[in-house]
Amino acid sequence: MTKPQRSAHPVPIVRPSPFVLRPGLAVLLALLLAGCRAGAPPSPPAVDADYLACRTAIERVYYSQREDAPPFEQVFTPEVMQKRVAEELLKERLLAEVFNQRISDDELSMEWDRIRQTTQAPQVLAQLEATLENDPARIKACLVKPILVDRFLRDAYANNTALHQAEYDEANRLRQRVLAGASMRTVGGDRYSELIYDANAKPVAEPPEPGTPQVIPLSAMEPEIKQVIEEQLKQPGDVSQVIVGRDDFKLLRLVERQPDRIALELILIPKRPFDDWFNQERQKRGQG
């Protein structure tokens, strides 16, 4: 699969930054010894007090925008914030260890510039900057980096071939059955649907009733689908190769092809959701 474009969500890597307190040697030694005990589950990364306070202050600003909400401390307890920050740290570790990606300072600066230029809540952004003492290092590490790490990690996961091999293989098996004469409807089961792209169709906000073709304006055809039709689906009955999408694998069969109307059968095999994979990784590392 194609390597994802970098546009990310980060989590502070476990290394001291200018505003982060270094953990004491005794604490590090205790963690190492605990991790080495036979049968002991992996220990979650220690949460730095400065970073925890920084992230809590940011959440407090966001929370202050809500109306008729219970007190902040009642919702974001120390335990809740500890868990949230530990998950952010884990995301950064996974980005580095599983996908060999790290967030550069240039990427942080570019993302911060983008946020400032495109924000629709300048007053909230100003509050966040003030909360972080207008310190560029704090802003990048506490505000910008978690956003980038999460985005990069999700992109990397979505585009990783090995992590979705089972679903890809299943899509190919279904394709072989269709090529051998089985109907798309029979093979696809509840993952089967019909698409009609019509030049005279009007945009419809609501999804179609189950078992009813989805009618879409021809002008709204996705570039990915258009390319597959042009390159692979020449005659009715033609079946596409497995189409690799961000969140799923698709299989298309051409039913009708006219200048103003194209009818397709679709089988969609979803990839494993990111949250399922991430929760599994949390459990592996003792953060379940």
Image (cartoon, rainbow, N blue to C red):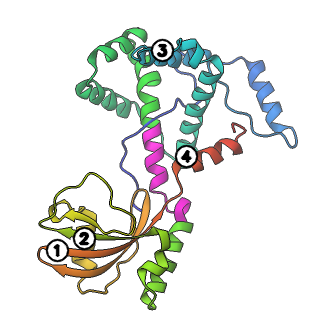
Give the number of callouts.
4
Determine which residue is flagged by label 3.
60
- Answer left or right for 73 relative to 222: right
- The residue beneath circle 2 is 196
Picture disc at residue 135: none
Q: CA distance from mark 3 to mark 1?
A: 53 Å
Alpha carbon of mark 4 to alpha carbon of mark 1: how far? Answer: 38 Å
> Does the stretch in magenta take in 135?
no
Q: Which residue is mark 1?
A: 261
Q: Earlier in the sequence, mark 2 or mark 1?
A: 2
- Magenta region: 150-165
What residue do we see at 25% from left, 75% from top? Answer: 263
Q: Marks 2 and 3, Cα distance to the nearest angstrom? A: 48 Å
Q: Which of the two marks, 3 or 1, is nearer to us in this view?
A: 1
Query: Mark 3 or mark 1, which has the lower sequence index?
Result: 3
Residue 75 appearing in the image: yes
Whole-percent x, y for residue 96 in the image: 54, 42
Viewer-side residue, 17 vs 58: 58
Quadrant containing the C terminus in the rendered view: top right
Upstream in the sequence, badge 2 or badge 4? 2
Neighbour class for label 4 at 10 Å: few (<14), some, many (≥20)? few
